[in-house]
Image: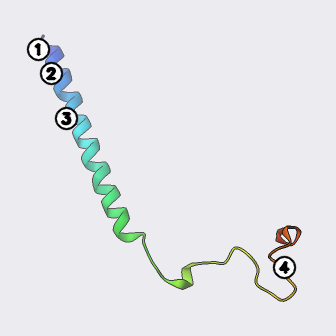
Amino acid sequence: MDGQRAAMALALAACIVVAGASTFLLLQDSEVGVSNDSESMVDPLLQDEGHDHRNASQHIL
């Protein structure tokens, strides 16, 4: 019974450590990764003369 109890305590401790590390990494990533600069946005469609956005055959790059 003591061996089973020790194994359960070890498994619980491992789960708590993993949950804490995951939370830390997710919070750290959300602070760094967001930027609202218009320079970082790229238009996926070409905007030059003679390019018709209504014609799907002209969207092949």
Residue beneath disc 3: 13
Residue type, mark 1 in image: Asp
Q: Residues within 10 Å of mark 4 (few under 14, many from 20)?
A: few
Whether residue 19 sits left or right of residue 41 in the image: it is left
**Residue 23 place in picture, x, y as percent:** 29, 52
Q: How far is the residue under mark 1 from the one under mark 3? A: 16 Å
Q: How far is the residue under mark 2 from the one under mark 4? A: 69 Å
Determine contact: label 2, label 4, CB under 8 Å: no
Is 10 rendered above or below residue 56? above
* Snapshot quadrant of residue 53: bottom right
Q: Residue at x 76, y 80 (%)?
A: 46
Residue beneath disc 2: 6
Residue beneath disc 1: 2
Residue beneath disc 4: 52
Is 50 rendered above or below residue 54? below
Between circles 2 and 4, the one closer to the viewer is 4
Whether residue 55 sits left or right of residue 19 in the image: it is right
